[in-house]
Image: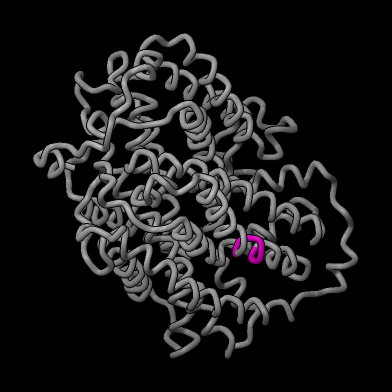
Amino acid sequence: MAASENDRVGSVETRGIEPVPDAERHGHASQMFWTWFAANISILGLPLGAALVSFRGLNIWQAAVVAILGSFGSFALVGALSIAGKRGGAPALTLSRAVFGVRGNAGPTLVTWMSRLGWETINTTTAAFALLALLDAAFGIRRNTVLTVVCLLVFIGCTLLISGLGHATIMWINRWASYVFGLLNLVVIGFLATTVDWGKVFHAQVGPVSSMVVGVGMIAAGTGIGWANTGADYARYLPRRIPGGRLVAASAFGAGIPLVVLISLGSLLAAGEPDLASASDPVSAINTMLPSWMSIPYLIAAFGGLLLSNHLSVYSAGLTMITLGIRVRRTLAVGLDVVVTFAGGIYFILIAKDFYGPFITFLTLLAVPITAWVGVFAVDLILRRSYDGAALMDVGRSSRYWFRGGVAWAAMIAWAAAIVVGLLFTEASTSATDVWFSGPFAHSWIGSNGLGWVMTLVLAAGVYALLRRFDGTVREEASAQPPQQQVLPAPAAREAS
């Protein structure tokens, strides 16, 4: 089916969060492959792999197995949740109104927006480091405050251009830029492989199986879980007829292939460079392993990979901001988002002393409420077969998704309970002496090995599956006559969206 004028490469996407009607659906499941391949060819996978060796004591073979299970498994979940976008034609957090209620959905939506901002700040900061290093390597221009701000603005400007144009342009760039930056990464990876201390690699001791279990959780939390609440954003233009299994496979392989390569390489490099796992500036840490002639292609690849990831995050953040109730056009929402990201980049580079520590701390805390949402949303997706497009856009009492007081209490209770339990097993800190938060069971085996998010996922899914059976408003909504077709809101409502 041909793309509509609203979704053409190079044109500004004017659609906000309102569902995409069947007549405007187009594309193939392979788009999800390129979406997640593009999002995961950044160099942030290398420190994750290094952490498996330096912090978890795994050898390279164990690290490779952990990378496969954590990467492919977590993005298979992303693909499964993106089926909701194909069914409902709306962004993930807009569809979430059907699960949590039009008012209850505000909590998960706010957390998601904060998560996206955090990832964007990490990407922007790392890309600025890469650009600063590139200017130094290529032209001998040394880093200073003004140049740092300029590098941040360059990266943000590129992000704003791509994300502002919207869905069709993003899908096109994801595919073709993946070839370019993917090849550059292969060249760099080939050279880095020659710097590996293979003697230490092959003589490394086998780590405990428990560390492998923990490693899978760490990789999943640091990769797919962070994207789980955005998959539907990129699947919403796909035709309903595409089998859901294809979306799962395309997402798992699209992200899994680059992640396994990068994480495995990071594990190899850690044999000779154990400090890579905790580097305050991972770009510079890797750059020091390369001769000057290899630095330029490496830094270009690093900058491009981060840009491919960041424009996806910013696009989703704009949609999430609108779902929160901020009544602006999608393009303006994207602009507001990058302004906040710029401020975060300034803080990380010019004020904060530690880069990677706050990154891990951020992931630790945000993984809990996001995973709780995933558990609830996944159960609803299994039991639900359709979404009412008009009701998704109606935030008043007349909405089918009003439930009781605008809240689906079965979902909200399950979400809140899972967050509380997850935090009991969570400790967020940048160092042994800088502890931001520590739950009472944070030093139990589950807590000390970073598996609190697994407890959160299982509990959220289980509690919601139980409570929805006793929630009359949920049963009433589920038994309502399904919509015959996607219904677009009135023009006035669309303008507000």
x and y percentages locating residue 170 in the rendered image = 35, 63
Decide which of 427, 487 is in the foreground and name it: 487
Observer-nearest of 16 and 270: 16
Whole-percent x and y of residue 318?
29, 49
Q: Is residue 14 visible?
A: yes
In the rendered structure, does residue 419 fall within the stretch colored magenta?
no
Whether residue 362 can be seen here: no
- Looking at the image, residue 386 lies above or below residue 204: above
Residue sticking out furthest to the left: 492
Residue found at x 90% / y 65%: 203
142 sits left or right of 73 in the view: left
Question: Within the image, what quadrant is residue 385 found in?
Answer: top left
Give the percent coordinates (x, y) of residue 319.
30, 46
What residue is shown at x 47% (from left), y 16% (from top)? 468
> Which quadrant of the rendered structure holds the C terminus?
top left
Way the structure is coloured: one colour
Stretch of the chain drawn in magenta: 258-262
In the depicted structure, whether residue 133 falls above or below residue 450:
below
Q: Quadrant of the N terminus?
A: bottom left
Q: Nearer the viewer, residue 449 or 393?
A: 393
Looking at this view, is 24 or 206 the one in front?
Answer: 24
Main secondary structure along the magenta-highlighted residues: helix
Q: Residue at x 58, y 43 (%)?
A: 429
